[in-house]
Every structure is written in C-alpha cells, then in structure tokens.
Image: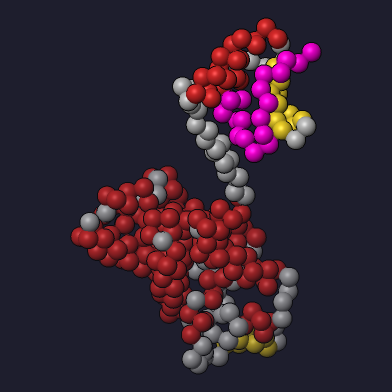
Amino acid sequence: MAELLYRGSLDEDLRPLSALLWQQRIVHRIVEEDGGQVVLLAQSSDRDRAADLLARWQSGELQITLKAAPRVQKRESALPALLRSAPVTLVLIGLSVFGFLLVYLGAPVSWIAMLTYEPFSLQSGRPVFEPASGELWRLLTPAFLHFGLMHIVFNSLWCWELGRRIEAALGSFNLAGLFVATAALSNFAQHSVSGPVLFGGLSGVVYAFLGFSWVAGWVNPRWRPLAPATPIMLFMVGWLLVCLLGVVDVLGFSVANAAHVGGLLSGAAIGLVFALVYRNRS
C-alpha cells in the first residue's frame, strides 16, 4: 500500500521535491486528491529518508533548479537543404533537363528555335537560320539545349560536381554571374567557328567551371579546395584533346569544340581575376 509523504495545494510546484526523491531513487508518484496534491511513496521503508529530504527542501537547505530539456531539432529533409546549399547550380541543371525534354519529347520546332543562338525554321527537313535581332537571351539559352541522354547526364553530373563547390565558396550571385559570362562567351566562340548551325549543351559552361576552379584554387590559397583533383583534370582535358583531334567525329558524334575551348579559357581568365582580387583583399 502506498505511503503518504506530503499533502499540498494544487498550485504548489512539487517538481523540485520529486526530482530530489528520484535522485535518491525513492520511487513515488504525485496525484491529485480532494482538491490538493499528495506525494505517495511506493515503499514504506523509504519513509524516513523521504521525510528528511522533504524537511530539508522546505527549509531551503536543499535546492534544485529545473532546466527545460533541450529541444530536439528535426532533421531537415534533403531537398530543402540542397536548394539552400546550391540553388543556382540546381536551377542550371533543371533548365538543362527542360531543354533536353523539349528535344527528346519532340516539342514544336518553333519552341526549340526560341532557344538556339539564331532562330531557324525547317525547310525540306533542313534547318535554315536567320540572323538574331536584339534577342539577347540567345547568347545564353543554347547552353540548355541537349540532344541526347548521355549529353544531359554527363553535363548535369559535372555541373553539379563543379558548380556547387564554386557556389559554396563564392556564393550564388557570383556563380550566376560566372554562368552568364562564360555561357555567352562559349556560345559566341562556337558560333564564330561553326557559323549558323544547330548547337547546344552545358559543356562549355562545365569547362568554364573547370577552368575557374583550377586557376582560382591554384592562385588563391583560400580557395585551394576548389581545385579539381588531378584525375579529374586529366580526364576532362584529355577528353577535350580527343575531341579536338577529331576522334569522336569519326565515331559519328558532333562536338562543340569551340564552346569547350572558349569556356575553359574564359573560366580560367575569370578565375585568375577573382583569385587575385580576393587574395589582395585578404
């Protein structure tokens, strides 16, 4: 049978007393009874020890401060965390996937022609281009057009690998500016070399990110983590050389080599400027 230790009013805070009792491993419970609170002991053999603690607590000899338990933060889901860590990188990948789907799902030619460097129409099954007039978005939008599954997968993976690291180091605004500058320059380089032909892809920007990361990480010690690992540099530059030598052309693939070279050089140049400016500031 439970042993009565103490009876108090309903507005009395008995939590400190309960904490003292539990600290001494005295099993008890506090219940409401007849308009008040009562402290009941599970074992009568604990009566003397409990009564001593009660008396010392009431006299103020023993005091205990209760602290609120720390709130357990809910783990954030993966998608919001990704959106906050690399929003511009993800937007670039998303727009590239959209451009790929336009081609893959057979969207009207007029839709695709809105994104090419110069507008075109099909005549006898062949694209016929017209000079662009004041449509400045065309400097950038060819970067989002992709004409094959491996094309979009390859570019998306490298954009994520390189772009998110630049965005983490320099911020979303700077990454967006880097994209605008290098997409325009790489697309201009390709058009200057190939003339009015259908080209597209994010690979010029990917090579720009590669050049930027390599030079900025090499010149500015604070950005050393940006520098791509040696195997990555060897693979990317090796692939660029293979394409420039025309090996992939023999296999039937069409590669925008000028966009790759233009992107790599423009990204490296911008990386050098950024690295020197920020190094002097530090």
Q: Out of 191 and 83, give the one closest to the viewer.
A: 83
Is 89 placed left or right of 280 in the picture? right
Figure quadrant of the N terminus? top right
Is 56 placed left or right of 38 in the picture? left
How many numbered circles are shown?
0
Q: In this view, does 43 lie above or below 174?
A: above
In the displayed image of the protein, which residue is found farthest to the top? 45
Residue 227 colored magenta? no
- Name the residue located 70 percent from the left edge and 87 percent from the top edge: 124
Q: Position of residue 38 (x, y in %)?
A: 70, 26
The residue segment tinted magenta is 1-19
Is 144 placed left or right of 167 in the picture? right
Please identify the quarter of the rendering in which residue 177 is found.
Answer: bottom left
Q: In this view, does 119 lie above or below 169?
A: below
Q: Out of 50 and 100, give the one closest to the viewer.
A: 50
Q: Is residue 22 above or below residue 203?
A: above
Please identify the quarter of the rendering in which residue 25 is found.
Answer: top right
Q: Is residue 229 above or below residue 91?
A: above
Q: Where is residue 184 in the image (x, y as percent from the top left)?
A: 44, 76
Q: Out of 90 and 38, give the one closest to the viewer.
A: 38
- Name the residue located 72 percent from the left edge and 81 percent from the top edge: 108
In the displayed image of the protein, which residue is found farthest to the bottom? 133
> Could you tell me if residue 243 is visible in this image?
no
> Could you tell me if residue 7 is visible in this image?
yes
Q: Where is residue 282 in the image (x, y as percent from the top left)?
A: 22, 56
Residue 8 colored magenta? yes
Q: Out of 73 and 236, give the one closest to the viewer.
A: 73
- Name the residue located 55 percent from the left edge and 19 percent from the top edge: 55
Q: Where is residue 49 in the image (x, y as percent from the top left)?
A: 59, 11
